[in-house]
Image: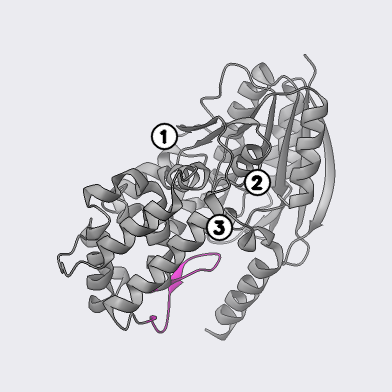
Amino acid sequence: MRIFLNMHYEFMLWMEKVNEWKDKPIHRIYVATEHGLTSNLVEKYFKEFSEAGCKLVIDPFVGTGTVLIEAQKRGVECIGIDANPWALLVSKAKTTPIASAEQLVMRVSSVLSKSDDDIFIPTKALEKYYTSKNLSILGNLRYLLELPTLRKYKPLLLTLFCKIAERYSKLMKSPAPRFRRKCKRIYSRQKLFEEFLQEVHLAVNDLRFLKSSSVHLILADSTSWLPEKFDGILTSPPFMNNIDYIRHSQLSLYWCGLANDSEDLSRLRSMQLVSCEAGVRRWKKVSDERYVNSIVRKITGSRKQGYSLFVKQYAYYFEQHLTLLAERLQWQAWYTIGDSFLGGAYIPLHRIIMRLAKKHNLKVIIEKLCNRIARGRKLYLLKMISKG
C-alpha cells in the first residue's frame, strides 16, 4: 500500500508540474494532462501554420479540446475528432461562446433555488462509486440540470457537474483509477449548489471573451476516418503506456447518460485506438512489422500475451491512421509522443511511428521535448511532413 501511495503522490505532483493549462482561462473549465503540448509548442506550431498560409487544423485525438481552444483564439478553423463521446462534450462546452453570461448565471441561480428534492441518477452503476448521501445530493443537482430552461447550456453545465462529481466519488485520480480509502463528504445540498454556482461563474467569465469561429466536432475513430483534405494536425495521441482512457472518464460517461454499464464501456473501448490491455480484442488485426515484432519479443512476465497483443494492435491501427494522414495532409502534422515500458521491455513508440510513417512517404523529424516523471522515460515531438 505504501508503494502505491508514493506512486499516487508522485503522479499528482507531476500533474501539478506539467499541466500548465490547469490555471489558464477556458482550459481550466475541465482539464487533463496534455503530454508535451506546452503553450510554447502550441504557439510555435500556429506561428508556422500561419506563415505557411494554412487554414484548417485537425486534432484527431481531441481529448479535452486544448488544440481547438488555441485554434479558436487565433481565428483558425479546426476539426476535433474523438471516439470517446465525453471528450466531444467537454470540447463542445469549452468552445461554445456564451452570448449572455448574466442570463446564464441568473437561470442557474433560479433553478438551484428551487426546493424540488427529486433526483436523477442515469444508471445504477454509479451506486458503486458514491456514498448514498453523496449520490442523493448529486442526483438532485443532476435532476435540476435537466430542466428545459437550462437545455441551451447543457454541454457546459454537464461538464462542470462531472468535474464536481469526480471530487466526491470513491475513485481517486492516478495512473490507474483506484478506490479512495476515505471519500470526501458533501455536507449539504446548499454547499454543493454553492460550489457548482462558483464553477459556473468562473466558466462564463472565461467564455464571455471567446471568439466565434468555425469549430467542428466529430465522433469518429481517426484510425478509420479523417477529412478528405486538411492543412495540418496538432495532437497528443494515446501512448503505449497501458492507460485506460475509458475507465478514466467512466463516471462522466455514466452521469451524462453516454454509457449505462460495463458492457457499454467495453463497446467504447472497442471503437478506439487500442490504448491499453483492456482494449485488446481477439477480432482486431495485428501488425506484423519486423521492428514491432523485435520489440514484442522482449516483453516478459505473466502479462506477456496481453501486452504483446496490445502493442501489435496499437501499431496496426496507428498505421491505418498514418495511411489516411499521408493521403490527405497538405502541410505538417505534429504529434507529441511518449515512450514506455511494458513487461520489462522498452517501448520506443516515437521510433515505431517514425518507421510506419516513412513507409507511407511521410518525411519525419524527431525532437526530444523533455523527461517524464518515471525514470528513463521521455517525451518527443514527431513532425510529419507531406511530400506531396
Do residues under tags 3 and 2 come within 8 Å of each other at their CB atoms?
no
x, y percent for residue 57: 65, 30
Q: Position of residue 221 (x, y in %)?
A: 49, 33
The CA span between labels 3 and 1 is: 34 Å
Magenta-span inclusion, residue 182:
yes
Amino acid type indicated by mark 2: Val
Span colored in magenta: 168-184
Reply above or below: 144 against 39. Answer: below
Which is closer to the viewer, label 3 or label 2? 3
Counting other residues with Cα less than 10 Å from the Cα at mark 1, is it few (<14), some (14-19), or many (20 or more)?
few
Say which residue appears at 80% left-offset and 36% top-offset.
47
Query: Which one is in front in this view, the residue at disc 1 or the one at disc 2?
Result: 1
User: Could you say where residue 127 lies in the image, as x and y percent from the top left?
Assistant: 25, 68
In the foreground, 207 or 352: 207
Sooner in the amino-acid sequence: mark 3 or mark 1 = 3
For residue 31, the mark is 3
Q: Quadrant of residue 185?
A: bottom left
Locate residue 387: give its quadrant.
Answer: top right
Q: Which residue is mark 1?
A: 283
State the residue position of label 2. 296
Label 3: element kind: loop
